[in-house]
Amino acid sequence: PDHLPGFPSVPMVEVEVGEIMTPHPVVFHKEDTVKSAARTMIEKDVAGGPVVDDDNNLIGILTEDDLMWKGAGAPLDHTLIPPVFIGAFDLFLFVQDNAAVQDELRKVLAKRVADAMTQEVVSINVDASMAEASQLMLKKKVNSLPVVEGTKVVGVVTRHDVLRALIASHSPLLE
């Protein structure tokens, strides 16, 4: 079908994130266990969700990537390539990105969502355009964005939502 129920058939420029987002998304709380969060992701068939405080303010995001560290079991090797050569001592120095190693180790050892979540969240306002959401997802290399009104989470918009809206809007870009 050319039109999907629940999506507006209007030009792309007029489509706002609030029209295509999933309202009332799966959310997590920092006190939740990693195990319960992983189980919720599987049961609800979602790749993650916003982490909110008791007042529904956005404080982080928990994704499958954050939980994959449990399966990896150890931080990745963050040795910078090429190594630094100190000629006076005929010594190669392998510099570690300690911040990245510490962050990954924190996720490997995490028992609570607070320790596994990503704190630097990329989000978008409910009245932003679909084009802005698309650009932000591409630029930041994320698959979904928490949708906020102020600091309150009101939904989630995914790449899938954007594609459905493109079809619903009969976009000539898909021709």
Image (cartoon, rainbow, N blue to C red):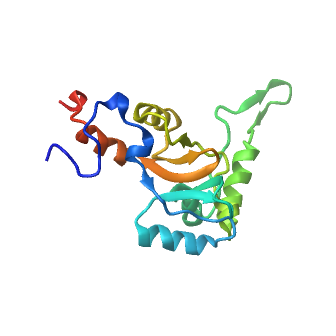
Residue at (61, 58) in percent of width and height: 51
Considering the image in quadrants, where does the C terminus appear?
top left
The relative height of residue 175 versus residue 101 in the rendered view (above or below) is above
Q: Is residue 1 left or right of residue 80?
A: left
Residue at (24, 52) in percent of width and height: 5
Residue in front for this viewpoint, 125 or 89: 125
The image shows residue 98 at horizontal and vertical percentages of 76, 46
The relative height of residue 105 versus residue 96 in the rendered view (above or below) is below
The image shows residue 56 at horizontal and vertical percentages of 63, 59
Count every numbered label the image shows and give the total. 0
Which residue is outermost to the top? Answer: 87
Q: Quadrant of residue 170?
A: top left
Which residue is outermost to the left? Answer: 1
Residue at (47, 67) in percent of width and height: 41
The relative height of residue 11 versus residue 29 in the rendered view (above or below) is above
Q: Is residue 84 left or right of residue 44?
A: right
The image shows residue 144 at horizontal and vertical percentages of 47, 47
Residue in front for this viewpoint, 53 or 69: 53
The relative height of residue 59 versus residue 86 in the rendered view (above or below) is below
Q: Is residue 156 left or right of residue 81?
A: left
Q: Is residue 49 visible to us here?
A: yes
Residue at (36, 47) in percent of width and height: 161
Which residue is outermost to the right? Answer: 88
Q: Is residue 63 visible to us here?
A: no
Q: Is residue 159 left or right of residue 81?
A: left
The image shows residue 147 at horizontal and vertical percentages of 52, 47
Q: Quadrant of residue 54?
A: bottom right
